[in-house]
Image (cartoon, rainbow, N blue to C red):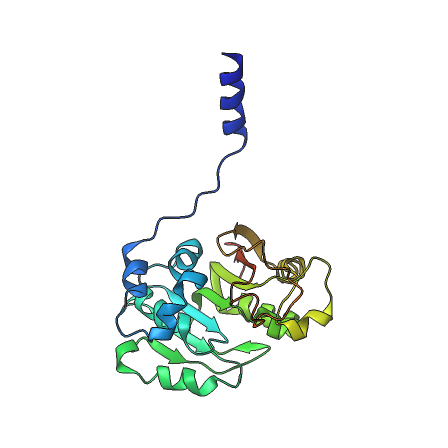
Amino acid sequence: MKAALAALALLIATPAVAQPAVAPNIARSVADPARPPLDVFRDDRRKPAETLAFAGVRDGMKVAELIPGNGYYTRILSKAVGPTGKVYTVPFGEPRSPLSAALAKDPAYSNIQLAAGAAGSIAVPEPVDMVWTVQNYHDVRQLAGPVNKAVFAALKPGGVYLIVDHSAKTGAGDETVALHRIDEAVVKQQVLAAGFVLEAEGEFLRNPADPRTVQIMDRSLNRATDQFVLRFRKPEAAR
């Protein structure tokens, strides 16, 4: 009896962190038949449904996506926020910027709009509910101050800042730039310094087999890097 009571007390004292259920808007976005086959092939590693559910993407949201690359998440976000929502892509002049421009003209994704932006400015025409950047924060690490300040300004009070990136070893310095990785602790420090609150951390993209010391495209990884998922929030009282 005492053992049972002790076990119950342990459960109460240590609440489980549950992954949110996948809502219908997210399920339909991942099942979108217009998605490129290569994107669909990568779903098992990137776990888009879990990522959107963790972020809390809902119908009607206004989302700014930083450095969208080939549009893997742009298409999914477009369908997840639906016709009353909006996805503003902010490529920051990355080499794949023309892909963002082309996607913004695709009638199948009519709620996508290309937005101008340099490191210190995110030129969205309205405050957004969420700023989203996946596997790219390491590329702006040296400009973290102005970037995070611009994200803070672009968000509505209470808005979400979702960051996913490839993990570097704890304490790793700038030598990880060539590996396309970043120390999770550095990201937290930089974003918290901009005024955000760290609300939740996702573990569903972790891979303990990744040594975190090799380049992310190394064949030994087969693209299955260890990744951290961080959900920050702009305080409701902030303007």
Residue 49 x, y percent position in the rendering: 37, 58
Give the vertical position of 1 relative to 121 (above or below). Answer: above
Residue 155 x, y percent position in the rendering: 48, 65
Q: Which residue is most to the top? A: 1
Q: In this image, 227 relative to 190: left or right? A: left
Q: Nearer the viewer, residue 35 or 55?
A: 35
Q: In this image, 147 relative to 96: left or right? A: right
Q: Residue at x 40, y 59 (%)?
A: 52
Give the vertical position of 46 relative to 89 (above or below). Answer: above
Q: Is residue 125 visible?
A: no
Q: Nearer the viewer, residue 65 or 172?
A: 172
Q: Residue at x 39, y 55 (%)?
A: 53
Q: Residue at x 67, y 64 (%)?
A: 213
Residue 19 x, y percent position in the rendering: 43, 47
Q: Residue at x 56, y 59 (%)?
A: 226
Q: Is residue 32 visible?
A: yes
